[in-house]
Amino acid sequence: MDPTDLALLAELEKGIPMVTEPFAEIGRRLGIPEEEVLRRAQRLREEGTIRKIRARINQRLLGITANALVAWHPPAGWGEEEFTRFSSAPGISHCYLRRPVPGRWEYTLYTVHHGRSREAVLAAVEEMARVTGCSDNIVLFSTEEYKRVPNVRINENGSDLP
């Protein structure tokens, strides 16, 4: 990698600009043509330096300020059809199964709900419980939003691990 590659990576980590031609804008910032930005990004992707480029939405700017992890204890005998109801419900961004800790934590289904208020999230959870028949749940609201950063492992000295 050369200094231009490093500068390109730094620009991409800031986020893709919300303009009609984002890669031309990045090129303008770096002093290179849009075609070179795209060529370099593709090469870095093929080499594995860039693993993925994805959208990250600032939900708070959209008015989505209430977020909750809901742990569910589904009735015995549930199958894929019942679990699909959760994963396809509006306002749920994550849905996954985990093993219980027998006698300590019997919840096996986890969903992450988003809404414009705690009341809206609680109403959505109550509606899911009603339509699915799974009323045994615990709602855990987020109390703080942490800065989202790429998956980087940090050692005890505070520096990146290889």
Image (spheres, helix red, strand yellow):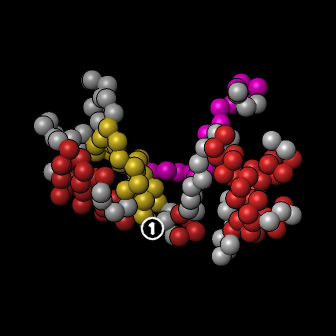
Instruction: From the top left corner, tell me how far across and down residue 78 is, in percent.
Output: 16, 41
The residue that appears at 20% across and 44% down in the rendered structure is 80
Dominant secondary structure of the residues highlighted in magenta in the image: loop
Per the image, is 5 magenta?
no
Q: Quadrant of residue 77?
A: top left
Residue 98, placed above or below residue 93: above
Q: Residue furthest left?
A: 77
Other residues around mark 1 within 10 Å, as few (<14) / some (14–19) / many (≥20): some
- Is 84 left or right of 159, judged from the image as shown? left
Residue 84 on image: x %, y %: 24, 51
* 150 is within the stretch colored magenta: yes
Q: Is 6 drawn above or below residue 18 in the view shown?
A: above
- Residue extent of the magenta highlight: 141-158
Q: Residue at x 53, y 51 (%)?
A: 143
Q: How many marks?
A: 1
Residue receiving disc 1? 116
> With respect to residue 77, does 68 lie above or below?
below
Choose between 78 and 44: the one closer to the eye.
Answer: 44
Residue 137 placed where, x, y %? Answer: 28, 45
User: Picture quarter containing residue 21?
Assistant: bottom right
Q: Is residue 88 left or right of residue 7?
A: left
Where is residue 116, by image quadrant? bottom left
The quarter of the picture where the C terminus appears is top right
Q: Residue at x 69, y 47 (%)?
A: 43
Q: Residue at x 18, y 57 (%)?
A: 130
Q: Position of residue 33 (x, y in %)?
A: 80, 65
Asked if 49 appears above or below 53 in the picture, the reply is above
Q: Is residue 124 in view from this perspective?
A: yes
Looking at the rendered structure, the kind of residue marked 1 is: Arg
The quadrant of the image that shows the N terminus is top right
In the rendered image, is residue 10 in sight? Answer: no
